[in-house]
Image (cartoon, rainbow, N blue to C red):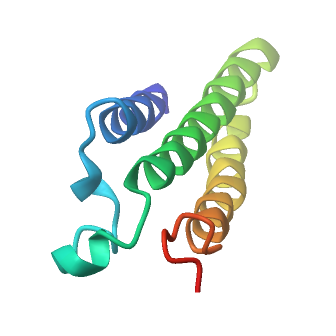
């Protein structure tokens, strides 16, 4: 589980600080004219915070599972992170506030 959290942290850092916007699904397939209509840095921030939040939930679940000696908590934390994190990312990224033309 810790490996998944590390992957999320690395991916979030690469997207935001490494400016690897091609890792953002959907954005990477847009033509250049369409990409110019979006604030890529804003989308990267949403992705970074979403992935970091999911990583924190996973790590807390891992620690709780070890502390309480109940391995099932890790699975609950992973699924909880996905249930909370993915909608956060999807809703914020598609809200329209990162469009430059604000139609």
Image quadrant where residue 90 sits: bottom right
Q: Residue at x 64, y 53 (%)?
A: 85
The quadrant of the picture occupied by the C terminus is: bottom right
Extreme right residue here? 68
Toward the viewer: 15 or 73? 15
Residue at screen point 42% across, 47% down: 41
The one of 29 and 75 positioned closer to us in this rendering: 29
Taking the view exactly as shown, the residue that stands out farthest to the front is: 101
Residue 60 visible: yes
- Residue drawn at 62 percent across, 46 percent down: 78
Q: Pick the residue in front: 18 or 39.
A: 39
In the displayed structure, would residue 60 be above or below residue 77? above
Name the residue located 58 percent from the left edge and 77 percent from the top edge.
102
Quarter of the view holding residue 67 = top right
Q: Is residue 18 above or below residue 103?
A: above
Residue 12 coordinates in the image, percent (x, y) = 42, 37
Could you tell me how many numbered marks the image carries?
Answer: 0
**Residue 28 lies in quadrant:** bottom left
Q: Position of residue 93 (x, y in %)?
A: 56, 65
Where does the image place residue 11, in percent across and percent down from the top left? 35, 39
- Left or right: where 73 falls relative to 95: right
Q: Between residues 19 and 7, which one lies in front from this camera angle?
A: 19
Determine if residue 30 is in view.
no
């Amino acid at each position: 589980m810790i490996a998944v959290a590390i992957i999320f942290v690395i991916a979030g850092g690469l997207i935001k600080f490494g400016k690897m916007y091609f890792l953002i699904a959907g954005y990477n397939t847009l033509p250049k004219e369409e990409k110019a209509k979006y604030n890529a840095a804003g989308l990267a921030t949403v992705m970074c915070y979403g992935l970091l939040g999911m990583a924190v939930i996973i790590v807390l679940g891992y620690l709780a599972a070890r502390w309480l000696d109940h391995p099932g908590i890790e699975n609950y934390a992973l699924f909880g992170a996905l249930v909370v994190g993915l909608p956060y990312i999807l809703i914020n990224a598609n809200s329209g506030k990162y469009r430059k033309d604000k139609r």
